[in-house]
Image: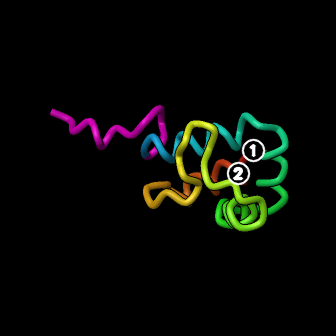
Amino acid sequence: MTNPDELGYNGWTNYETWNVALWIDNDQGLHEIAQELGSYSKLVELLTEELDNHYTPDGVPWKDSGINVAEVDEMIAGS
């Protein structure tokens, strides 16, 4: 039997990765900023350090250690 944890969440590594990707991809302003900055880590730095925004609207920390940064970077680059 397949381990449900290996399946990920809606095609993403996990809920946290899916949630931050969802917000970046569905908020035009955030999406444009992410593309301009070119990486999730730079976006998180802007959000948390300069704008004092530490959570997605769903309450997931932008700096959650479970986020697959490479996967989010791929989404940002491919958008």
Badge 1: how crowded within 10 Å, few (<14), some, or many (20+)?
few
Pinpoint residue 79: horizontal percent, then vertical percent: 75, 44
Which residue is identified by label 2?
A: 76
Q: CA distance from mark 2 to mark 1?
A: 5 Å
Point 47% across, 32% down: residue: 10
Q: Quick one: SS at disc 2?
A: helix
Left or right: 75, with 32 as reference point: left
Q: Quick one: SS at disc 1?
A: loop
Point 66% across, 60% down: residue: 40
In the image, farthest residue toward the left: 1
Residue 9: in magenta span: yes
Labels 2 and 1 touching (C-beta < 8 A): yes
Q: How many marks?
A: 2
In the image, farthest residue toward the front: 52
Image quarter (top left, top right, bottom left or bottom right) of the N terminus? top left
Range of residues picked out in magenta = 1-13
Which residue is identified by label 1?
A: 79
Instruction: Specify the label residue 51 is tagged with.
Output: none
Pinpoint residue 65: horizontal percent, then vertical percent: 45, 61
Pinpoint residue 22: horizontal percent, then vertical percent: 63, 37
Point 57% across, 37% down: residue: 58
The amino acid beneath tag 2 is Ile
Left or right: 58, with 51 as reference point: left
